[in-house]
Image (cartoon, rainbow, N blue to C red):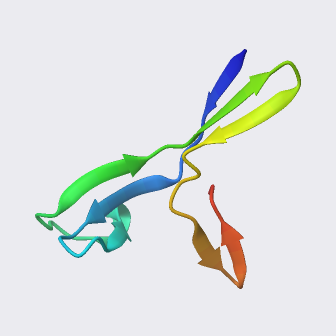
Amino acid sequence: MKIYPLKDGDFSVDKNKNFTYLEDTKNDKNLKMAVQPFLIEKAGNLVLLDTGLGWMEIGIWLTCR
């Protein structure tokens, strides 16, 4: 079995559950968190745990950057 940690990004989250990339914020007092899904490979099968936040960019949904 192999486990691959993936990275969706580091975020600031406000009380209304609005996520903003940390590099886009300046000294805010909101909760800081990292979103990190995992991909598990076992016997040729793949399982994706916690698919991340998902982002739409140019009309295409992205879950990993």
> Image point 68% across, 72% down: which residue?
61
Give the vertical position of 5 relative to 58 (above or below).
Answer: above
Residue 18 occupies which quadrant of the picture? bottom left
> Image point 55% across, 43% down: which residue?
37
40 vs 64, nearest the viewer: 40
Extreme-left residue of the structure: 29
The percent position of residue 2, horizontal first and vertical second, equals: 71, 19
Give the vertical position of 36 relative to 64 (above or below).
Answer: above
Give the vertical position of 35 relative to 59 (above or below).
Answer: above
The percent position of residue 20, horizontal first and vertical second, equals: 35, 70
> Image point 62% across, 77% down: which residue?
56
- Answer with left or right where residue 20 lies relative to residue 40: left
Extreme-bottom residue of the structure: 59
Residue 40 occupies which quadrant of the picture? top right
- Answer with left or right where residue 44 lies relative to residue 21: right
**Is the C terminus in the top left, top right, bottom left or bottom right quadrant?**
bottom right
**Is the N terminus in the top left, top right, bottom left or bottom right quadrant?**
top right
The percent position of residue 10, horizontal first and vertical second, equals: 39, 54
> Image point 53% across, 54% down: which residue?
52
- Answer with left or right where residue 15 lies relative to residue 11: left
- Answer with left or right where residue 65 lies relative to residue 53: right
